[in-house]
Amino acid sequence: MRAVAFDVSIPGFVLAKTAGQITDSAFFGSLSGLRIQDLPEPDIPGPDWVKVEVVQSGICGSDIGCLTYSASPSMEPFGSFPAVLGHEIVGTVKSLGGNVDGLARGQRVTIDPMISCATRGYGRSDFCPSCSRGLHCTCERAGEKGLTLLNGKHISPGVTIGYHSDLPGGWGEVLLAHKSQVFAVDDNVSDDMAVLVEPLSIAMHAVLGTKPHPESSVMVLGSGTIALATIWALRATGHQGLILSQVKRVHEKRLAQKMGATEVVFPGQSAIEALLKTGAKAYKPIIGKEVFSGGGFSAVYDCVGNSQSLQQAMKFASPRGKLAMIGCVGKTRNMDLTMLWARELNVQGFVGYGLEEWEGGKCHTFEVVQSLLGSTGNSIEEIITHKFSLEDYCQALKTSGNHRESGAVKVLLRAKR
């Protein structure tokens, strides 16, 4: 099968940090650890597994962070390389094991890429505490080899398909997934909508986890896929109050409005003016930037994940407000945490998806998202701005990585020739 694979190495890190300042080839091209290759098609390891033929897969900000070596090294022990990247996936069932029910060959599916105790080969009675609660995105065996045998060896450590040496991701033509990771796509859901189920579920998990009051004023920081998905998730779950979106570019403003934002501002004075409208008052300390008291937003969703966005989130949140960290924040410098304790803020990080409380029962976040797709009238597919073939992966990654110039939001790689 054809696949775009990436290998992590010390020489690759050095090149990325030096030559990467001069040329994108150090990240995505001939100087990088990224190559399109002909790889053996993986075999189904057991009766609980499904082989999927990929239709298309998204390029995520975390993929760019991995390829450019700009992400925090803290998660490095929970991946394995070389790996075929890509964790936002829609495909069709190519073959399936004898214990897989509810799926058929040729059926369209989307994949929960998070690797659970079940994927690692453990029985339910031996699940880790997180997997026992249905929150496998924080599986506590991520740094260990599993019991499942793939090609005669125990499955490697890893958090997710796409950063795993044994489980190829969506930037290839074929992948494997445990039956617990495979979700049928409804007939009324297009391929473009289906490939967005994964990022939409990340946002939905955060919205369901914060549960803002339906009439409250909330703020969403960021203009990428997750930020736009958060706006959509808020409206899809019935949020009626003001949603303030902060973006950087005009085309992102249009998309935020289409997803359901009440008001869209740019960083700086227009954002401060929106804060003041909530009843906040500005005060100037002897040294440093102005601070605010009163008003604010009951929930702030930080979908950027850097020191500036976290600092702003703490300033703009109301007393005892909720701060949802959805952006992959890593190391920060000179972080002033005064407002964290001075306002008694509730800060929570969110990653992935899992078992949610929904309409009086419990179901997977992917199922919640699929049930709501189309219900808001939002043009979800407009988040997708570019599509490329696997062979054009280098141009696709440059487009995604240089989104300020390209205007890209979500870039896809199409696996089918």
Image (cartoon, rainbow, N blue to C red):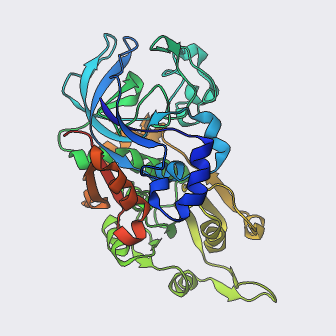
Q: Is residue 16 visible in the rendered structure shown here?
A: yes
Residue 378, given in percent of the width and then of the height, sits at: 27, 61
Q: Is residue 328 visible in the rendered structure shown here?
A: no
Name the one closer to the observer, 229 or 114: 114
Residue occupying the point 63% across, 65% down:
310
Residue 317, given in percent of the width and then of the height, sits at: 62, 70
Q: Quadrant of residue 399?
A: bottom left
Residue 336, given in percent of the width and then of the height, sits at: 76, 69
Vertical side of 385 occupied by 87: above or below: above
Residue occupying the point 71% across, 84% down:
289
Q: Quadrant of residue 263?
A: bottom left
| Lateral position of residue 338 relative to residue 92, left or right | right
Residue occupying the point 42% across, 65% down:
402
In the picture, the quarter occupied by the C terminus is top left
Q: Residue furthest right?
A: 286
| Lateral position of residue 315 relative to residue 326, left or right | right
Residue occupying the point 47% across, 66% down:
215
Vertical side of 156 occupied by 114: above or below: below
How many numbered marks does the figure carry? Answer: 0
Name the one closer to the observer, 39 or 156: 39
Name the one closer to the observer, 223 or 188: 223
Q: Quadrant of residue 39?
A: top left
Vertical side of 269 occupied by 40: above or below: above
